[in-house]
Image: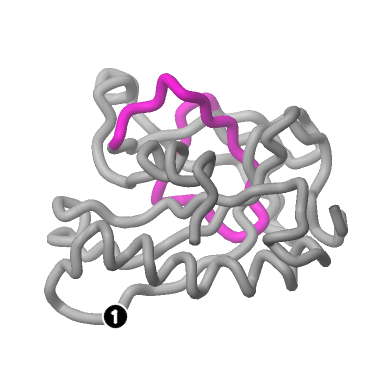
Amino acid sequence: MLAVSALSIAALGLTGCSVLNQFLPSSQPSRDADTGEIVEKQDNADVFSLRVGDCVNTDSTMADEISGLPMVPCDQSHTDEVYFSYMVEGDEFPGEDAIIAEAEQKCVPAFEEFVGAGYQDSALDYWPMYPTEGSWSDGDREVLCLVYDPSAETVGSLAGAAR
């Protein structure tokens, strides 16, 4: 079962168009050519450019559907880190509840592998960023699992944090 805090944040974690970001053009983040890591802050990076290992800043003022996010190098202060991704199968949009249920089945085991502590025992939390019905019709099938510390922003990766 998703934690209450994850459910409230999950409502923020949809891909698509944002009311807040619709007037700002989103762009690709600057990445290191060898490692693929983000090398400089991008205030409104294209949400579809997110990869496992990327760090972003989210907050409670985000719209339900987003097209861009502030992405930062993980060695800078950030709120969330993408730790796992997978593709939803099927041709028809399964519905938000089904995607959230599947995300729990896939993100929780990956959480333990990434963090080094079981989800139920961890001080950290996660939320899934998933396709909307509108983005689904455009071919979006990717679910991203993001880990965060509910008590503070993070500097550095939470990989192996074991907490």
Q: Is residue 152 magenta?
A: no
Check the image and report above or below for 102 versus 1.
Answer: below
Q: Secondary structure at mark 1?
A: loop
Report the span colored magenta.
43-64
Amino acid beneath label 1: Glu
Q: Nearer the viewer, residue 6 or 83?
A: 6
Give residue 137's position: percent from left, percent from top: 13, 61
Give residue 58's position: percent from left, percent from top: 53, 30
According to the picture, the residue beneath numbered tag 1 turns out to be 89
Which quarter of the figure has residue 34? bottom right
Q: In this rendering, would 157 be left or right of 108?
A: right
Residue at 74%, 72% in the rendered image: 113
Q: How is the image coloured?
A: one colour
Report crowding for label 1: few under 14, some 14 to 19, many 20 or more residues within 10 A (C-alpha). Answer: few
Residue at 51%, 25% in the rendered image: 59
Give residue 71's position: percent from left, percent from top: 58, 36
Check the image and report above or below for 61 versus 115.
Answer: above
